[in-house]
Image (tube, grey):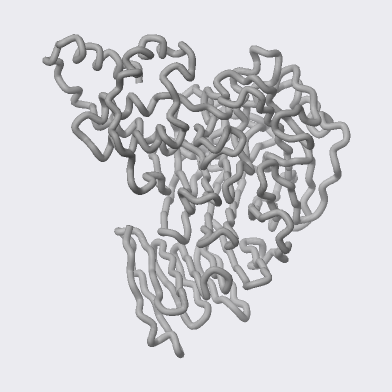
Amino acid sequence: MRFGPFWNALLRAGIHGPEVDKWLHHEKMTFQYMGDMLTPPEPRVGGRRVYHPIGRSSSGVIDPTFMIGADPFGAGDPDHGRMMRWYWEQQGKPSPDCMGTTGGRDLSLTLLAFSKLPAESSAVPPLRSRRWEGMGAIFRSQVGSEYESNIVFRHDPFAWNLYEANNGALYFYGKGAPLLPRFGGYWMGQKGQPTLMSVPFGNRVLFADGMHDQDWTNGLGTMQTFASLGVLADYADGRTLDGAWWRGTLFAKDLNRDDPVYLLVRDDVTRANVASALHWWVLSKAVQPEGIEQPGVVLLKGTDETWLANMGKNWRDAPVLAGQLQYFTGQCGVDLDLFIATPSAPNIITDAAGVSAHAPYNNNPRMYEFQQLVRIEQPAGKTSYLTLLAPRWPGSPVPVYRTIAEGTGVAVTRKDGEDRLFLCQHPVTYTDKLVRFAGQAGFARIGGAAPLRLMVLDGSISAGGITLATASSAALVYDGKTITVYCPKDARNVTVKRSGKMNRVKVTMVQE
């Protein structure tokens, strides 16, 4: 970012001989990566896309970086330039001085003001689900709609010594709203507040014996599997370097506004004789009842350590949470069902933490951000957690959720259909009157936005007269007329078997 303005300065001074950087494609990829770090349109910041604050950042940050991505790094590449303009427009066309003069930006303000941005942006939104080696995975659904969903799953060794403490964590925008976002508190220590940057403030597992010297985050590890299956599903899993924590994530996408979108998360822990806990941080109305521009239910002072020493007691009037299904009224027009499939009798502690207004670089200086902690504790010897996160429109019927497949799956009964979702790091078998499943992960979605949707990872799944099988990953949708199968280009042994009236249905394969 800081090199670009100097390059432009040379060109505009009439020096046309500098050698083109042989690493230019890496620099272009860096700007594309930054684009992939954008949220859906953020209702707390005027509907502009902002950066997920997974590093040294506040919430609500926009900047003119994509102007540099277009000029000079997009020179001679119209598609890249149009992509950069799309990102810039999605951030509200920020001016060069919107971030002040920090980080060398004072050197680039004048130059940026004359950047040669392409006249048109990408006709199709460039955001999609993808794997970024060194960071993890991005999941997306319904990009460009008012009900867009997005997940960032960090699970790779990257940015060493720069906030990898939340490696293994994930952050979730569902149906157009921030539901489990990352705290953007890095700079708040300057204001005498917790920074909320340490491990317990991420959506991830913690161990009671604390950090190990060889793996001080308890989360540094590698992503092992990634699959993006078109409009139907995304999947990723990863394991820590010490092998003590495996996390799998299954994203079942929505086909329209009223179609449910699900995030199923499995955590397996294997550290002997050590208790564990799973933290979920929810942007709930309960901890900031007067809205995003008013403070919430806890005082904002001290340090992370101060807050942690009083965990479970910082929020004096905190409710008692009990049972598998927890419901949260959201701050931005979308609510959340959090179903704890495993353990079936969860021990839950709740609390709250927050970031004050006037956080540096937040484009809404009046914005406070308070989140509610759902801490699920298990003693040593208990090795698994399975959580379903389901955004829901306010006032919509509450589905019935129940644990199935010996704690490796969830059944959902909706007013217009049934869903079965499965996730485990080992093969699972399950049969009921609607579905037959044998595999590591998958789902059957019956009714609603489509008569039938199936997905499977390394196995087979059958429902409604259709069986989908693969040695890798695949998903299909039957829309009432045709069957469309989505699978990776390198998918192995994908088969679709039909019976009864389904024998006459045409099958189309889409490899991405």
Q: Position of residue 174 (x, y in %)?
A: 58, 49
Give whichever of 366, 500 is nearer the camera. Answer: 366
Q: Which residue lies furthest to the front in this view?
A: 119
Q: Where is residue 232 in the image (x, y as percent from the top left)?
A: 47, 61
Give whichever of 28, 158 is nearer the camera. Answer: 28
Q: Residue furthest bottom?
A: 500
* Residue beneath the point at 51% across and 42% down: 40
Q: Which residue lies furthest to the left in this view?
A: 17
**Residue 473 relative to residue 243: left or right:** left
**Residue 81 relative to residue 17: left or right:** right
The correct choice, above or below, for 385 with respect to 356 in the image is below
Q: How many labels does the image show?
A: 0
The correct choice, above or below, for 226 with respect to 432 in the image is above
Q: Position of residue 86 (x, y in %)?
A: 37, 38
Give whichever of 167, 382 is nearer the camera. Answer: 167
Q: Where is residue 292 in the image (x, y as percent from the top left)?
A: 70, 33
Residue 154 in view of the camera = yes
Q: In which quarter of the image is residue 348?
A: top right
* Residue beneath the point at 58% across and 51% down: 175
